Amino acid sequence: MPRQLLSSLAVAALAVGLSACGTSRFDGPRARAGVGPQAALEPTVPAVPSGAVTAAPLAPPPGASAAPDGPPPVGGEVAAVAPGSNVIAEPVAPPPPPPPVVATGRSAVVGSWTARDAAGASCKVSLSSAPALDLYKASAAGCANKDLAKVTAWDYRDGEVYLYQAGGTVAARLRQGGGALDGALTKSGASLALVR
């Protein structure tokens, strides 16, 4: 026999042998169900017809936005809802920010202020941190009120600001309230406010 013929027969025999070995081993349980000795061990299950299949997008999980790239729910957080309840979750408003901290004391009142008297007139009053004997230096500019125009010093005692004229006369007493100083002129008793 020529070599070529022997080679062809060997390849054909090998192919037949391999195909016989792989028939039931790689086909899975359904293909083997009716073949060989396993047919008695594996019951046959009839195919069950199914209804029409429809597709729809799933609803997002609780607390997630509808679109993965969409904005978060309004108000930030969503209130927890018990499973199975018919309550619609309302957004929970974030807590309000804390009120601003207003500094108090002598160092909180140092600086320039706009003074407004009861008549509606306004002028500039500066309270310095530079000492002047046992008080601190102050100045007033453009004040129509004569008592306020003569202010040269100030002090902070017991939560109150005292404005002094030359010679030590108290021109006004003011108390801190928020970011302003509210009080009155000493001689007339007219109201006076210093605002930033």
Image: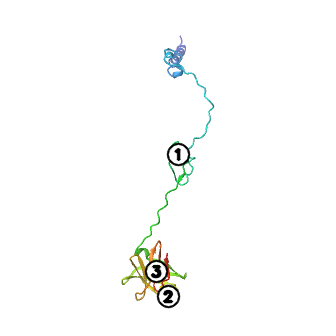
Q: Which mark is residue 146?
A: 2
> Disc 3 to disc 1, how far (Cα)?
59 Å
Q: What is the x, y in percent for residue 143?
A: 51, 84
Residue at the far bottom: name it: 167
Q: Nearer the viewer, residue 128 or 104?
A: 104
Crowdedness of circle 1 by 10 Å Cα count: few (<14), some, many (20+)? few
User: Image point 43% across, 73% down: which residue?
Assistant: 108
Indicate the secondary structure of the residue bearing disc 1: loop
Which of the two marks, 3 or 1, is nearer to us in this view?
A: 1
CB under 8 Å between discs 3 and 1: no
Which quarter of the picture shows residue 136?
bottom left
Can you tell which of label 2 and label 3 is closer to the viewer? 2
Instruction: State the residue in front, 53 or 176.
Output: 176
| Kind of residue at badge 1 | Pro
* Residue type at tag 2: Lys
Disc marking residue 26: none
When the figure is inspected, residue 63 is found, relative to residue 182, above or below; the finding is above
Q: Give the secondary structure at mark 3.
A: strand
The answer to the question of whether label 2 and label 1 lie on touching residues, with beta carbons closer than 8 A, is: no
Q: Left or right of 70: which side holds 177?
A: left
Expressed as whole percent of the image width and height from the top left, the position of residue 172 reads 45, 82
Q: Which residue is mark 1?
A: 62
Asked if residue 71 is positioned above or below residue 176 in the image, the reply reads above
| Residue 126: image tag | 3
> What secondary structure is marked by label 2?
helix
Which amino acid is tagged 3?
Ser
